[in-house]
Image (cartoon, rainbow, N blue to C red):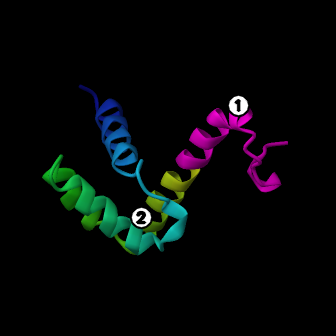
Amino acid sequence: MNALSTHLDDLLIVLRASADFDPTASSPGQLQKRLASELEHLRPDLASRVRALDEWHAEVLAEFVVDAHLVADALDGPERGLQLPDDTRVG
């Protein structure tokens, strides 16, 4: 498997681990700890890598997870009448 596929698979696992909580309710450091805790029983190696992220990468990961949750909500939104903030729209 090439490196890109491996990394994308890992990101998908991280997103699945975050599915049951609100990533906007915690700081990047708290989200990092919570994700690592969730991943510990599934993928201890990935949990260790998440724990080892420096502050900048933890912030990037937190933004990625928040954005992924916003997109997921938007995809569900029209049927549920979800109103997204204007700053999440492109254009």
Name above or below for residue 34 compared with residue 2.
below
Q: Label 2: few (<14), some or many (≥20) within 10 Å?
A: some
Q: Nearer the viewer, mark 1 or mark 2?
A: 1
Disc 2 residue type?
His
Q: Position of residue 68 (x, y in %)?
A: 54, 45
- Residue found at x 35% / y 71%: 54
Residues shaded magenta: 68-91
Q: Position of residue 3 (x, y in %)?
A: 29, 35
Closer to us: 68 or 73 = 73
- Residue found at x 32% / y 65%: 34
Q: Viewed as shown, does residue 90 lie left or right of 48? A: right
Instruction: Tell me which corner region of the image, top left, top right, bottom left or bottom right, holds residue 28.
Output: bottom left
Closer to us: 49 or 25 = 25
Q: Which residue is mark 2?
A: 57
| SS type, badge 1 | helix
- Residue found at x 40% / y 51%: 20
| SS type, badge 2 | helix
Q: Residue furthest front?
A: 80
Q: Position of residue 15 (x, y in %)?
A: 40, 46
Distance of mark 1 from mark 2, alpha carbons? 35 Å
Q: Position of residue 50 (x, y in %)?
A: 28, 60
Quarter of the image with the N terminus is top left
Q: Viewed as shown, does residue 32 lie left or right of 51? A: right
Name above or below for residue 20 compared with residue 32.
above
**Any magenta on residue 26?**
no
Name above or below for residue 35 compared with residue 26.
above
Disc 1 + disc 2, Cβ < 8 Å = no
**Any magenta on residue 74?**
yes
Q: Viewed as shown, does residue 33 lie left or right of 40? A: right
Q: Which residue is mark 1?
A: 79
What is the chief secondary structure element of the magenta stretch?
helix
